[in-house]
Amino acid sequence: MTEGMLDKSVISVIRIAELKGEKIMQLQHVSGRNAGHIILYALSTCPWCKKTKKLLADLGVDYYYVDVDLLDENEREEVVETIKQWNPARSYPTLVINSKIPIVGFKENEIRKAVQT
Amino acid sequence: MSNETVITPNEVDRLYERLKMESEAAGYNLNPDTDFTKELVKGLLTNEKRYGYQACPCRLSSGKKDEDLDIICPCDYRDSDLTDFDTCY
C-alpha cells in the first residue's frame, strides 16, 4: 500500500457516508472554510489534542477529527494502522492535511501556515 | 466508550496538588499553565477510571496494564520529551 492510501480511503469513506447521510465511526465533522482535507487523529483525554481542535476551530477551517480512544476495538485497530503510516510513534495529536506530510503534536505555527489559503 | 464516569473538579484539584508536591520533590515542575495541566490531570483520572491505572492521556492505552507499563504517568518518555521539547507529550 502506497503512502497516503489508507488516509485517502478514510476520506473516501467519509465522503460516501456524507452522501448517504450516515455517521461513520466516530468521525466528527467541524464545518468551516475549505483549507483542504484535514483529518485530526486525537485522543479525548489529551489536552494537546484539545488545543489543536480549538486552534482549527478558531481558524475556522473545515476538518474531521476522530478521538481514537473512544472507538471500539475493531475501528481502533484500523485507525491506528492508518496513523502508523503517518506517524510511526503513533503519538497524538496527528494532523494530516491533504494526505501529505503530517503535523505531529500541537505545533501552532506549522498548523497556521498549513491551513493558510 | 459509554458510561464514562464524570470527573469532578474536586478530584482534579486533589490529584493536581498531589502531583505538584511529588513532582517538585523530585526536581520537576508542572506546566505553569494551570488550566492546561488540570485538563491533563482530568485525562489521567479518566484513564484511571477507564483502565484502572493512570495511563498517559496523550498516548493510546491498550487497556492492559502489562502492555502499558511504559506509558503510565510519569511515563518512560518524560525525560526524553523534556530534553527535546521542554515539555512532555
Image: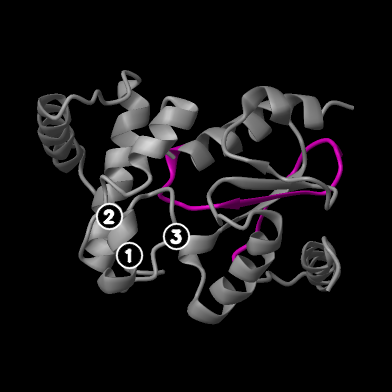
**Would you name the residue on which mark 3 appears?**
B60
Residue A117 at x, y = what percent? Answer: 90, 27
| x 67%, y 34%: residue | A56
| Chain letter for the residue marked with disc 3 in the picture | B
Do the residues indicated by labels 2 and 3 lie within the same chain of the protein? yes
Q: Amino acid at mark 2?
A: Ile
Range shown magenta:
A26-47
| x 51%, y 69%: residue | A71
Q: Amino acid at mark 1?
A: Asp
Circle nearer the N terminus (1, 3) = 3
Circles 1 and 3, Cβ within 8 Å, touching? The answer is no
Circles 2 and 1, Cβ within 8 Å, touching? The answer is yes
**Would you name the residue on which mark 2 appears?**
B72
**Would you name the residue on which mark 1 appears?**
B68
Given residues A83 and A117, the one toward you in this image is: A83
Residue A13 at x, y = what percent? Answer: 80, 71
Q: How is the image coloured?
A: one colour
Q: Is residue B16 above or below residue A38?
A: above
Residue A62 lies within the magenta run: no
| Chain letter for the residue marked with disc 2 in the picture | B
Numbered disc 3: secondary structure:
loop
Circle nearer the N terminus (2, 3) = 3
Q: Residue furthest right?
A: A117
Mark number displayed over residue A62: none
Measure how far apart labels 2 and 3 are at the Cα level: 11 Å
